[in-house]
Image (cartoon, helix red, strand yellow):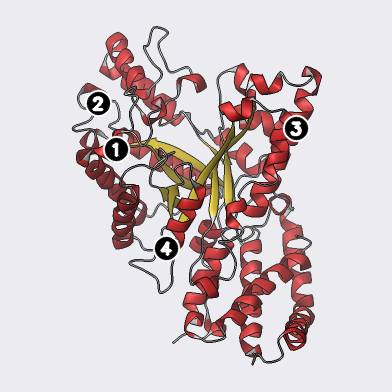
Amino acid sequence: MARPMDLAPPTPRDIIIYRYQHGVNVGSVFVLERWLGAMYEEDTDGSSELEAVKRSLQTRGLERTKAKWEAHWLAGLTEGDLLWLRDVARCNSIRLPIGYFTLGPSFCLGTSFEGDMANVYINAWNIAKRLIDKCYDHGIGVLIDFHAVPGGANAASHSGTESGRAELWGSMHYRALARDCLAFIVQEVTHHELSGVIGIEICNESIRDAPGIDEFYDEVIEITAAINPSLPVYISDGWDLSRALDYALLKNRVPVPIGGNPVIVDTHRHYTSPESKSISPESIIEQIHGELSELETRQGHVFDRKSAVDVYVGEYSCAMDMQTWNRMDASQRLRLTKTFGQEQSRRWTAKASGSAFWTFKTDSTDSSDWGFKDQVNTGAIPAPAWLTIPREQVSSAIDQAEIQRTHLGKKALTDHSGYWASTSPEIVLGLHRFTQGWDIGYSDAKHFFGAMAHGFLPGGGDGGDKIGAVDLWTRKRMVEANEFDQQSGWEWEHGFRKGISDFYAAVGLT
């Protein structure tokens, strides 16, 4: 049985999975959206990927269409793009939407893409894998977002077709095909060592109260666990964050259920809904301060609740509806857009395990509020402070933190024992557990922070990393330390969390 002091340090894989994910969606590359790009013939009916490829086949034929699509995929993230993401935007991750058709013709059987359309995608998955590897070489992780699922998880055209229906949930055929697709992706990630993959997202923006959604999630999580039990599974909140959080808490319970894949909830925050149109930009900005409040009663105290959950903001932007903007002086728009982005960035950094702006590239000058480059350049979307620290300063900060380590550890123990002695003197403390937890927490935070600077991760850029999925990381370390089997495991957790926060204070981060 492992003791806390015997725990191995975080691996590179641990760090890339559990660090705070600061990123962007690479949208309209492997799943087209007409408003974002110029891949559509002018006379194309509709805005889905299916309509775009059908019309191109009619006008260009298979070989020219295939060449056009492949050129588009290959240009999705150029070397220049990757350097900009790493060195300017300071991204350490992207969210990559793909479709079932991305996986090739065999996954298009019995769907609207069967036939000549499917043959356009013969090389799509190999190109996607090369993109994932290129990202990893630059220190950027990739969340594979199964965006366009068979039949559609929602009725929108970004599910790949113009059906106007969310047919995944009512079709056994589509559900079986979706499971096969996800199993294939997990096998590829695992057996082809796609080291940059930080997780797999089961579906994008499921409709609210989708029939059978829990059973579908159960099936996919069980399949994933059989192949790769450490790969995080991201689930759509289905526009009901509380319900999704409770589902994830059930799946993340201890003792660890089948496989034990960490389940993270993906939630999207857009402010262009009919409700948002009726209020001012200032009111929307004020709302940001209360976002993700559903976490308040569901996070912390991992030992007591025997579970953990974290949230990822998979889509957000700086866009508001024109009816909203029309409620204020047009001269204030740039200032308020910047404030809007900064307030979102601040909130997601404080409450979520990561976030991804929608989207990286837009071909339309009318879409700048949705364009990551524009918003980074105006200062609306700043990188978290720790990702901007020069490499040499990361190393010197760690050296200073080590000098303070003994003093901080003693002070933390004194404060802990003094607090409980004054508030609950009847409690028998296991102070050694607090000390062991503190030591592991301090060390873990140090390993995350120094991983890039010390060459532990590829990329070679500036910046440190912070633990992002804090509750799930706490759960993982407590399982490894067998602390859930101890009566005073809560003290280990208190020490662990205090060790993490003390390290961040020591290197000047809060």
Name which residue lies at 57% across and 26% down.
274
Mark 1, residue position: 168
Q: Earlier in the sequence, mark 2 or mark 3?
A: 2
* Residue 185 image position (x, y, % from top left): 33, 47
Whole-angstrom CA distance, mark 1 to mark 4, is 24 Å
Q: Earlier in the sequence, mark 1 or mark 2?
A: 2
**Horizontal relation, residue 132 to residue 114: left or right:** right
Q: Secondary structure at mark 2?
A: loop
Q: Nearer the viewer, residue 263 or 505?
A: 263
The label shown at residue 313 is: none
Give, as a three-letter code, the residue at label 2: Ser
| Residue count near mark 1 (Cα–Cα under 10 Å), binned few <14, some 14–19, many ≥20 | many
Q: Are marks 1 and 3 in contact (CB under 8 Å)?
A: no
**Pointer 3 residue:** 282
Where disc 3 sits, the SS reads helix
Q: Which residue is mark 2?
A: 112
Residue at (38%, 20%) from the top-left corner? 68
Q: Position of residue 1 (x, y in %)?
A: 44, 87
Q: Is residue 11 visible?
A: yes
Number of numbered discs present?
Answer: 4
Q: Which residue is mark 4?
A: 250
Q: Earlier in the sequence, mark 1 or mark 3?
A: 1
